[in-house]
Image (tube, rainbow, N blue to C red):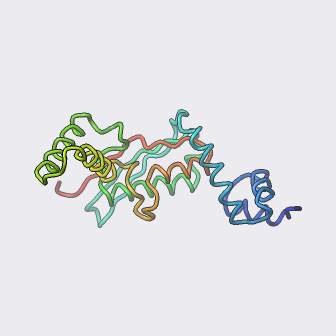
Amino acid sequence: MEISASLVKQLRDETGAGFMECKKALEETSGDLEKAKLVLKEKGLARAEKKIGRTASQGLIHAYIHGEGKLGVLVEVNCETDFVARTDDFKELVHEIALQIAGMAPEYVAVEDVPEEVIGQEKEIYRKQAENEGKPAEIIDKIVEGKVQNFYKSKVLLEQPYVRDDSKTIKDLIKEKIALLGENIVVRRFARWTLGE
């Protein structure tokens, strides 16, 4: 099937993917625009996984103030090049991450950042709760593990459901931008202040 240049251009405009990638995706899907978008997304996310280990030392520090100065967030998000750091897509991602921090008050960036003693204390609390509720011993470990996962979803930025679309996590949102921009992106650190706390 012959793919028209206008269809390739439309897909390119809607996805930001390269010309040849768009053409191949349209050929693969017999000119179906929506299916071609899915193909590009899947390929992009697969490539994003490969980029995750690369060094990211450029980026932005972004300040977000909310509620007439009652809440403030400072976040550093890194990418590989200054060129990408200046793009609107990267700036938008950094702003969205700052909004997430303001709204959901995470305490850690990644699961690896949670101290072992904190997880140990949480597990002990969950185990005692399950025992006090009379849960059978054989399912207590599963209950504890489930509650630890919920702890991560509430306290760890990358594991939190994205406030604008809870079908994905912040980690998923970042992977999508890695696929789009072609560079590794890392949330380095953040601070959140509430007036009077």
Asked if residue 186 lies left or right of residue 122, the reply is right
x and y, in percent, of residue 194 in the image: 23, 56
The outermost residue toward the right is: 2
Q: Which of the two residues, 57 or 177, is positioned nearer the viewer here?
A: 177
Instruction: Give the residue displayed 56% in from the left and 51% down from the top.
Output: 177
Q: Which of the two residues, 176 or 168, is positioned nearer the viewer here?
A: 168
Asked if residue 52 lies left or right of residue 72, the reply is right
The outermost residue toward the left is: 132
Q: Which of the two residues, 12 or 117, is positioned nearer the viewer here?
A: 117
Instruction: Give the residue displayed 30% in from the left and 52% down from the top.
Output: 150
x and y, in percent, of residue 69 in the image: 28, 62
x and y, in percent, of residue 48 in the image: 59, 44
Instruction: Give the residue displayed 55% in from the left and 34% down from the top.
Output: 54
| Image quadrant where one finds the C terminus | bottom left
Instruction: Give the residue displayed 59% in from the left and 38% down from the top.
Output: 50
x and y, in percent, of residue 40 in the image: 68, 54
> Measured along the vertical axis of the image, is residue 60 above or below residue 38?
above
| Image quadrant where one finds the N terminus | bottom right
> Measured along the vertical axis of the image, is residue 109 above or below residue 88?
above
How many numbered discs sit on the rendered protein?
0
